[in-house]
Amino acid sequence: MDEKQIFYDWWKNNGCRGISYCENHYDKIPNRTIREYLKEFNKEGAVKKEKSKQKIIQINDLHIPFHDKKTIEIFLKFLKDVKIDKLVIAGDLLDFYELSTFDKDPKRKFTIQDEIDQCYDVLKEFKKYCSEIHFIKGNHEDRLRRFLWKNPSLASIKVLELSKLLNLDTLGITYHDFEYIYRNFRFTHGTVVRQESGASAKAELLKYGSSMASGHTHRLGFYLKTDARGTVAAYEGGCMCNLNPEYIQGVPNWQQGFLVYNFDNNRFFCQVVPILEHKFIYGNKVYQ
């Protein structure tokens, strides 16, 4: 990605701010170049100022091919009804089962290519209802990176990069290696797992110190903290994978669901939407 595109993405994520803000907050590009870029964007009409109100949906932990197909089907009905500005996929879209170092069921017959094909089909469906999608790498996608690093002779082959394997450029989906920051709100997959719902959100918030959301735990929950500086919050986005995985005995403490954010300038309001037995309610409508 070239310097201009890096600045362009940063500028959009910060609300298309003016010259003085950009020069004071963006240290990767010389101020003179920033002015030139802004002038060029305005001249070409390449970027319109983003509206202050934005509706963003976050999903995560589908773990394709272990995704719950019925849940995805219901979620697509929801996307068709509700006009959103952005869809954030906060990691573990794929499972990369074959690259796992854990024991595997020998009866499993699908391949890595099967996973990639199914993932591409799901992303195409999402794209029908949302033009701007952001995909953040999770720890399961990182299995690919770890495999390539253990086999460095393959690591230089660009077609094996995750974004290339999933054809994200073709789909018009933006890839983020670790996090996506939007108006000072941090979307990431997460690295912390605590035993109870909301506890991981608290740990992530205390780790980063700013409002954020993550996946990873397969739980729904949130944590808020208020001090002299104001109120910050952290959210856990649940999952959309099968709730009865082969590798867990008993009932896992997981919940299906997603998060709905309504941004108004730099203020946001988040709604946690649980999916229970393939049913959820949003805006007085039942989806099932």
Image (cartoon, helix red, strand yellow):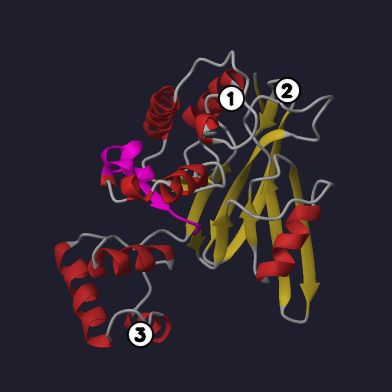
Name the residue carrying label 1.
66
Mark 1 vs mark 2, CA separation in Å? 10 Å
Asked if the residue at tag 2 contacts the one at tag 1, i.e. Cβ–Cβ closer than 8 Å, the answer is no
> Does 36 appear above or below 191?
below
Label 1, residues with CA under 10 Å away: few <14, some 14-19, many ≥20: some
Give the percent coordinates (x, y) of residue 11. Answer: 36, 68
Please provide the residue range marked out in magenta: 159-179
Which one is nearer the viewer's eye here, 147 or 3? 147
| Eye-nearest disc, 2 or 3 | 2
Give the percent coordinates (x, y) of residue 210. Answer: 65, 69
What secondary structure is marked by label 2? loop
Name the residue carrying label 2.
244
| Eye-nearest disc, 3 or 1 | 1
Give the percent coordinates (x, y) of residue 110. Answer: 48, 18
Give the percent coordinates (x, y) of residue 98. Answer: 51, 29
With 138 as the anchor, is 236 left or right in this view? right
